[in-house]
Amino acid sequence: MNFKSKLQAEHLEISQSPWLIELVAFYLNFSESNHILDYKLHDIPFSCDLTVADSEPVLRLVLPGYANLEYNLTCPICLNTVFHPYALSCGHIFCKSCACSAGSVLIFQGLKSASSKMKCPVCREDGVYGNAVSMSELNLLLKRRFKEQWKERLVEEHGEVTKQTKEYWELQTRYFSGI
């Protein structure tokens, strides 16, 4: 079976994989830092880029004659560009803070501490938080491309983490002191 047939046979699984998004983000981060403009994968020319379409960030991967893939990088919860993106095991991508909120955990506790009964807010699949993956290459790409927006979100999230941490420890203190 040739590459094109394999890609077509596995199209849905491959095209929906957050690992493909991470790979494209890695390539863009690497190529920007090393000034690589064109690349061929086993004699297959391809292109990828992060663009803004209709005010929303879109990651595009084009394999001419094989596939044209687009990934909207808008969080389905807050409707902003994903910030500190995490992919749940079902493949849906969210801001870390949005995913933590949907999983009923505090940001500093992290997604892995969510109950296995918690469901993805998009597809409603349960048990998706335990294997959530931080998308560090995508985060780096977004940080580089959207510097001002990223800085603003960093300040907002830091404030929210501080607030949640303070409330958590105040509740713990009350609980242990019997108040």
Image (spheres, rainbow, N blue to C red):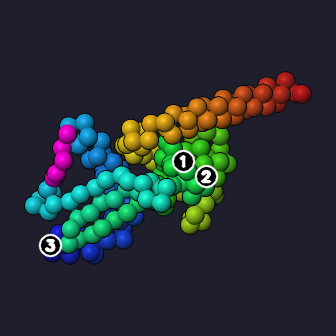
Q: Is residue 47 left or right of residue 18?
A: left
> Residue 108 appears at what percent x and percent y?
60, 35
What kind of element bears circle 2? loop
Q: Amino acid at mark 2?
A: Cys
Asked if labels 1 and 2 touch by Cβ distance under 8 angstroms, the answer is: yes
Location of residue 111 with respect to 12 vertically, above or below: above
Residue 96 visible at all: yes
Location of residue 65 with respect to 165 vertically, above or below: below
Q: Amino acid at mark 1?
A: Cys
Q: Nearest to the eye among marks 2 and 3: give it.
A: 2
Residue 78 marker: 2
Was residue 56 drawn as part of the magenta stretch in this picture? no
Kindly identify which residue carries mark 3.
2
Q: Amino acid at mark 3?
A: Asn
In this picture, which residue range is highlighted in magenta?
Answer: 35-39
Q: Residue at x 30, y 67 (%)?
A: 68
> Residue 32 appears at what percent x and percent y?
26, 40
What kind of element bears circle 1? strand
Q: Earlier in the sequence, mark 2 or mark 3?
A: 3
